[in-house]
Image (cartoon, helix red, strand yellow):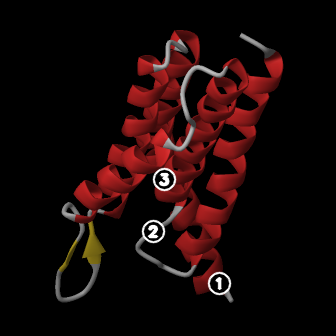
Amino acid sequence: MEFQIIFKLVLALILGGILGLERETKKREAGFQTYSLVSLGACLFTIVSISLAKLKIIDPSIVIGIAVGVGFIGAGTIFRTENRIEGVTTAAGLWTTAAIGFTIGSGFYSLAIIGAFFVLLILFGFGLIEEKILKYLTKIKKVY
């Protein structure tokens, strides 16, 4: 697999995470993990669509149907309680998993494996990072 493709995935993950951290500091429902997942999923969909179009294998617009359809399913996992909205990260995880499935179906196995690894990193690792950063930011706000 090309270094450039891995670089794209890592950059999507990092930049999505940075944007999500900003949302976390403002206590928004979609934050660090959600933004990272959406950025990573969009990157996977784009890489595979462009690659398939260059190979003239399929019309890359097929990805639209998958992304929209799974987005609809993901919307069903989001619900509002009295004080907050829940399920946004689950919806983003489903959507990104669709990107991984599309990647596998298109024959880009290494890319799918790396994408799945990054999803696990986001869901497990970023949750821990998120907790530590939020605790630190809460301490800073109490001091000032």
Judged left or right of residue 97, residue 62 is right
* Mark closer to the observer (1, 2): 2
Q: Nearer the viewer, residue 7 or 44?
A: 44
Q: Is residue 94 above or below residue 86?
A: above
Q: Residue 143's spot in the image, x, y percent?
A: 65, 84
In the rendered image, which residue does mark 2 sit on? 30
- In the image, what residue type sits under mark 2? Ala
Q: Secondary structure at mark 1?
A: helix
- In the depicted view, which residue is nearer to us: 59 or 42? 59
Q: Is residue 92 above or below residue 118?
A: below
Marks 3/1: CA–CA distance = 27 Å
Disc ID at residue 143: 1
Q: Nearer the viewer, mark 3 or mark 1?
A: 3
For badge 3, the amino acid type reads Gln
Q: Is residue 34 left or right of residue 43?
A: left
Q: What amino acid is at disc 1? A: Val
Q: Name the residue: 38% across, 56% down.
A: 68
